[in-house]
Amino acid sequence: MHWTATLILCAFLLLSSYTYFFSESTIDGVRDLGFPDFFRIQLGVLKILAVVILLLPKAPIYLKEWAYAGFFFDFVLAFVAHLQAQDGEYLPALVAIVLLLVSYTLEGQLTQEA
């Protein structure tokens, strides 16, 4: 179950990163939310790096903790930004938070068992 949630989460994040770089509608949407372009680019790169960390079974636990924390803040801030913009696009952030919590909780159980 851990790997299922983590793989779905990572696929979602990689798609998100891809759209940050190559989708005009996403680029315009990030701008419409009031964020500068450099923030979009940094977020896309950091998401890719964090996905790599989450998918490496032997990655140090402190790096995984940072990746999970970063994603949690990203998803909460995305949820708030979309609510504030009243664009109706907040549901993906809620789904991502649920997937993140499932992955994180089950990651902790795997770590304790090892």
Image (cartoon, rainbow, N blue to C red):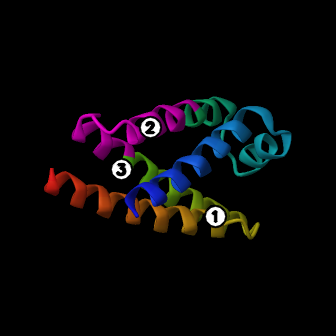
Residues shaded magenta: 45-67
Location of residue 33 in the rendering, given as x and y in whole percent from the top left corner: 70, 51
Q: Which mark is residue 107?
A: none
Quadrant location of the N terminus in the rendered image: bottom left
Q: Earlier in the sequence, mark 1 or mark 2?
A: 2
Instruction: Identify the element where label 1 is drawn.
Output: helix
Location of residue 93 in the rendering, given as x and y in whole percent from the top left corner: 58, 63
Front of the two marks 2 and 3: 2
Query: Counting other residues with Cα less than 10 Å from the Cα at mark 3, is it few (<14), some (14-19), or many (20 or more)?
Result: some
Amino acid type, callout 1: Pro
Residue matched to label 1: 92
Location of residue 65 in the rendering, given as x and y in whole percent from the top left corner: 29, 46
Amino acid type, callout 2: Ala
The answer to which image quadrant residue 62 occupies is: top left
The answer to which image quadrant residue 108 occupies is: bottom left
Instruction: Identify the element where label 3 is drawn.
Output: helix
Q: Which mark is residue 50?
A: 2
Instruction: Identify the element where label 2 is drawn.
Output: helix
Residue at image position (51%, 51%) is: 7
> Mark 1 to mark 2: distance in Å?
19 Å
Residue at image position (74%, 43%) is: 31
Residue matched to label 3: 69
Q: Is residue 52 magenta?
A: yes
